[in-house]
Image: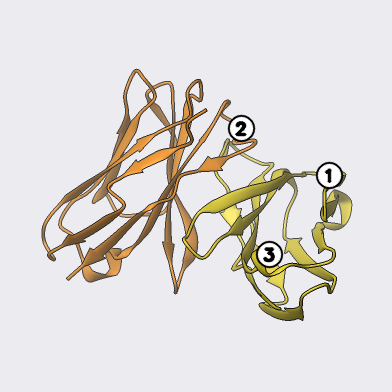
Amino acid sequence: KAGVTQTPRYLIKTRGQQVTLSCSPISGHRSVSWYQQTPGQGLQFLFEYFSETQRNKGNFPGRFSGRQFSNSRSEMNVSTLELGDSALYLCASSLALSGVGYTFGSGTRLTVV
Amino acid sequence: GIQVEQSPPDLILQEGANSTLRCNFSDSVNNLQWFHQNPWGQLINLFYIPSGTKQNGRLSATTVATERYSLLYISSSQTTDSGVYFCAVGDAGGTSYGKLTFGQGTILTVHP
């Protein structure tokens, strides 16, 4: 079966712009979570969606937002990009809300210049 | 929030050697997973192991929840085992659901 698909794989944006990243979970998985990975802070939880509802949110500013559609696909948006937003953004899906058996996508590498 | 510490931070081995990676966590957990991040950035789920012992080929893991630690054993290491190994936990308290807190990882390098 197809894995978790994230698009695009690479992205270069200018400071002040906004960006939208997409994540398609494994078929049948209803929970989607997003993580940011940077060399300095490591892997940090952004948010989690289940049945189109945000169930949990990490400690990130309001510039970071997301949503989930009825087919479980999810998008995250970062507005007013800052240099510090440069990171690998990873999406994970799982069958249930508990996060058991996370399957991660290959990530979107965002560079802000 | 819950704290996760992994040791050692770096590990260099010759092919064929065995190794043990450790993960300490500061509070009760309802979820503990081990991941391997390959050089291309993909995180691969190795074990879901909030307690007990599991084995999968050359890899095995043990979590002693009452003492708040988990161990990942790699036997007869191969160059393809190189990468970063992460321990991630879910806080048993509150409504953390699927939120995982990751450790800083152990960078494993296996030389031929």
B44 relative position to B31: left or right? left
- The chain holding disc 2 is A
Q: Amino acid at mark 3?
A: Asp
The answer to which image quadrant residue A34 occupies is top left
Instruction: Name the tint of chain A in the rendering.
Output: orange
Q: Kindly indicate whether the residues beneath marks 3 and 2 are on one polypeptide chain.
A: no
Residue B39 vs residue A62, the one in the foreground: B39
- Rounded to the nearest angstrom, the CA distance separating label 3 from label 1 is 24 Å
Residue position for label 2: A98
Residue position for label 3: B81
- Residue drawn 85% across and 45% down? B54
- Residue drawn 55% across and 53% down? B43
Residue B49, above or below A31: below
- The chain holding disc 3 is B
Q: Secondary structure at mark 3?
A: helix
| Image location (x, y in percent) of residue B78 | 73, 67
Q: Amino acid at mark 1?
A: Ser
The answer to which image quadrant residue B97 occupies is top right
Locate the C terminus of chain B by quadrant.
bottom right
- Residue drawn 74% across and 63% down? B23
Locate the N terminus of chain B by quadrant.
bottom right
Residue position for label 1: B51
Q: Secondary structure at mark 1?
A: loop
| Image location (x, y in percent) of residue A98 | 61, 32
- Residue drawn 65% across and 46% down? B91
Q: Bin the neighbour count of mark 2 within 10 Å (Cα to Cα): few under 14, some 14-19, many 20 and up.
A: some
B17 relative position to B26: left or right? right
Q: Bin the neighbour count of mark 1 within 10 Å (Cα to Cα): few under 14, some 14-19, many 20 and up.
A: some
Dot 3 and dot 2 residues touching (CB under 8 Å): no
